[in-house]
Structures are given as C-alpha cells and as structure tokens.
Amino acid sequence: MSIEQSIRCNVCGRFKGEANKWFSCAKDTLRFSAFNKKAARHICSEECAHRLLAQELQRVREKER
C-alpha cells in the first residue's frame, strides 16, 4: 500500500487517488491549503470542504446555547 492509498478524507473517509482534488487543513482552524501529506487534516473535494465548514459552524451554534 502506497502512502497515497493510506490517506483518507477526514470528512467522508474516501482514500486519496490521483483523480481527486485534495486540500489540506490545519487541525484547529479552517485554514485550507494545497494538499500536503504531512498536514493534520486531509479534504478530498470542495464538497467535503463545505461539509467541514458546516460542521464547524454547527459547533459554534451549539456553544452559544
């Protein structure tokens, strides 16, 4: 198994493949960057980036209650 095959999207669980358009994201922020296999979080697509943002916004709403 190559390193690429062992990297999974932190949102949907999809394994990294050559055709995917991946991003990296800092662990404690939503600061996105170009894919870096050493990053804390890996995001496979814009759709999963939007899902991650929605999850974080939901956490903010829940803290305010």
Image (cartoon, grey):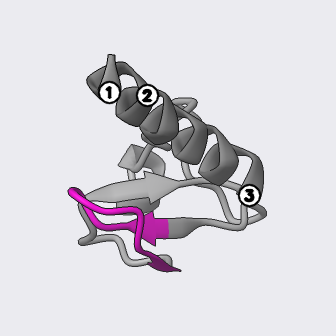
Question: Is label 1 in a helix, a strand or a loop?
Answer: helix
Which disc, if any, is residue 46?
3
The stretch of residues the image draws in magenta is 24-33
Are the residues tagged 1 and 2 within 8 Å (C-beta)? yes
Are the residues tagged 2 and 3 within 8 Å (C-beta)? no
Q: Which residue lies furthest to the bottom in this view?
A: 34
At a point 61% along the width and 66% down the height, the residue shown is: 22
State the residue in front, 62 or 33: 62
At label 1, counting other C-alpha atoms closer than 10 Å, the crowd grade (few under 14, some 14-19, many 20 or more) is few
Are the residues tagged 1 and 3 within 8 Å (C-beta)? no
> Residue 5 magenta-drawn?
no
Percent x, y for residue 11?
Answer: 51, 35
Q: How many labels does the image show?
A: 3
Query: Which residue carries the number 1 mark?
Result: 64
First-in-chain label (1 vs 3)? 3
CA–CA distance in space, label 1 to label 2? 5 Å
Q: Which residue lies furthest to the front in this view?
A: 65
At a point 48% along the width and 28% down the height, the residue shown is: 58
Task: Tell me the quarter of the picture where residue 38 sits.
Answer: bottom left
Percent x, y for residue 40?
Answer: 24, 60
* Overall secondary structure of the magenta section: loop
Say which amino acid is labelled 3: Glu
Horizontal side of 50 relative to 32 (left or right) equals right
Which disc, if any, is residue 61?
2
CA–CA distance in space, label 2 to label 3? 23 Å
Question: Is label 2 in a helix, a strand or a loop?
Answer: helix
Is 17 rendered above or below residue 31? above
Horizontal side of 43 relative to 20 (left or right) equals left
Is 34 rendered above or below residue 46? below
Can you see residue 14?
A: yes
Say which amino acid is labelled 1: Glu
